[in-house]
Image: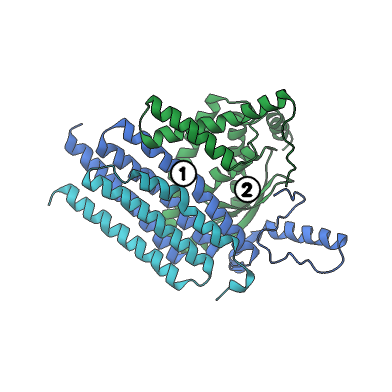
Chain colours: A blue, B cyan, C green
Amino acid sequence: MSPDLLDILAAVLLVLGALLSLAAGVGLWRFPDALSRLHAGTKPQVLGLVFIVAAIALTARSFAVLLVLVPVLLFQMLTAPIAAHMVGRAGYRTKNFRRELLAVDQLEDAVERASRADAEVEVGADPDADNPDRTFGRDQRM
Amino acid sequence: MTLTTVLYLITGGLFTVGALFAVARVVKGPTILDRVIGSDVLLTTLMLVLGAEMVVNGHTQTVPLMIVIAATAAFSTVAVARNVSRQDRKE
Amino acid sequence: MTDFEGPTTRREIRWRIWQQLPLLLVLVVLWMLMWGSLTPLTIITGIVVAVLVTRAFYLPPVELSGRFNVLWFVVFLARFGVALVVGSFQVAFLAFTPKATEQNSIVAVQLVTRSDFVMTLTAIAISLIPGSIVIEVDRAEGILYLHALGADDEDAIDRVRHEVQTTEQRLVRAIGSTDDMQRMNEGRIVS
């Protein structure tokens, strides 16, 4: 391929990446509640990063550069779901979402069952209800 | 005005509008979780813009910066999420 | 927290070192990737930095199952890549027409695996492909609770559950322990 064609291809990849970033921003604005905005904020950005990384590798025309860019992709794909998970967990536990948007809530059933089981064991109020670090289920290892 | 220049300009415009929407979310809220999601999107967009700048200007000097942002941008979000309490709702 | 008794017998010490080796290897490779060169200097400094980091920030070693099926791993990566591309465009499309997201759900999915590592990788993979984010994990029972975008009726929920379970199956076939594989095969005959 001629150098010009590769440059144009890189520019097109840039536009695609920017388009996905725009979609992330627009989704962040238009989605109805915090839990949905999580989806908009994390998924398009990862694919946008893939396109940008491909564009950089095309422009530099070297395999070594692509190798150095792999950690960027890897880190982003590992840390973005973690952040999304923590925000989602905090949002659910502190009721920071709009319940009318949930058609089915299977976690609520499990939580109710767990708190009923807890109530049978202890008498009195559960002081941990507001603690974001509390784990559900029997495993208290962490 | 070559084709690539036009494409670069379009890229810049799209990134800017996306970032403005993220800032709008940070301003509007209404909860702190929305704001922190918005700031995370803003930071990731910044990383993407760094990458785009490398394509436009033909160098690869800011790749270490991209690595650092990719690895650590999520931590601020996690730090805020862990300290949200019920009183923060609809602040 | 787990109680840490230091390794006593020589066999235990060797086992500890052997367990840490994959992590050290990954760190050294990462170091070399970041410096972009393959000289002996980077290898040596990489080993030094990796050992220092694992000593300073001591984490319990990840329990690997010792199985690595390359073919299924490639299959997993390929399907994951396709789902990532499709899903990101789907969410991007939804961003411009948000009427479809008025109904979401929180879905519970029972996983087959008992290993921390496979469960974490499944949760990460699920959070990246279309329509679901893991918001709660029940570690004792092995259940993931996902927030599914646009899942309003039983069909959509079943589809989400099926997607999660097939992703987990591919991962278990690639790096799961034989225990997990046995449980997975039993589960498929029953349900």
The x, y position of residue A67, in whole percent, is 37, 34
Residue A49 location, x and y as percent?
38, 47
**Residue matched to label 1:** A75
Alpha carbon distance from label 2 to label 1: 31 Å
Looking at the image, residue A66 sits to the left or right of residue C144; the answer is left
Residue at screen point 32% across, 63% down:
B17
Q: Amino acid at mark 1?
A: Phe
Where disc 2 sits, the SS reads: helix
The answer as to whether the residues below labels 2 and 1 share one chain is no
Pick whichever, A58 or C7, lies toward us. Answer: C7
Quadrant location of residue C23? Answer: top right
User: Relative to C44, is C80 above or below?
Assistant: below
- The x and y percentages for residue C6 are 72, 35
Q: Nearer the viewer, residue C138 or C71?
A: C138
Is C102 placed above or below A76 here? below
Would you say B30 lies left or right of C11 here?
A: left
Instruction: Specify the subunit that label 2 lies on.
Output: C
Q: Is residue C96 visible?
A: no
Q: Residue at x 63, y 36 (%)?
A: C62
**Regarding mark 1 in the picture, which secondary structure is present there?**
helix
